[in-house]
Image (spheres, helix red, strand yellow):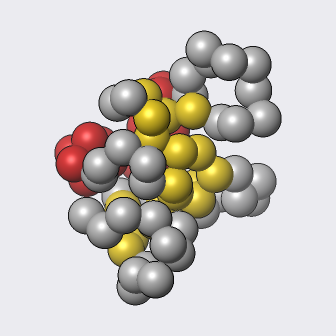
Amino acid sequence: MCDTVAVATIRELDDLPDGTAIEILDKRGSWVIKLFGDWVDLNKPAGTTQNVYTYVNTRRYGARVLEGSPEK
């Protein structure tokens, strides 16, 4: 398990490795996972990316790397 890593910028998101899951710190508390360079929500249809949603809301509210995800 890894310590909590706070993320607040697009550069920090881009630097995270594939397989990293983050929780966006908004009211919804939604989480996404980075696969093949894109952010995806496993509850959405296959092939749907959440890149814009992830970038905008991470800048607005911040995000944290979920425990057990690869470290930065």
The front one of 5 and 36 is 36
- The image shows residue 8 at horizontal and vertical percentages of 35, 58
Residue in view at x 36 percent, y 64 percent? 70
Q: Would residue 27 be found to the left or right of residue 34 on screen?
A: right
- The image shows residue 28 at horizontal and vertical percentages of 76, 54
Q: Would residue 72 be found to the left or right of residue 40 on screen?
A: left
The front one of 2 and 5 is 2
User: Looking at the rendering, which quadrant does residue 7 occupy?
Assistant: bottom left
Residue in view at x 22 percent, y 48 percent? 15
Q: Is residue 61 visible?
A: no
- The image shows residue 1 at horizontal and vertical percentages of 46, 83
The front one of 55 and 68 is 68
- Vertical relation: 12 (above or below) 10: below
| The furthest residue to the top | 47
- The image shows residue 57 at horizontal and vertical percentages of 53, 44
Residue in view at x 75 percent, y 26 percent? 44
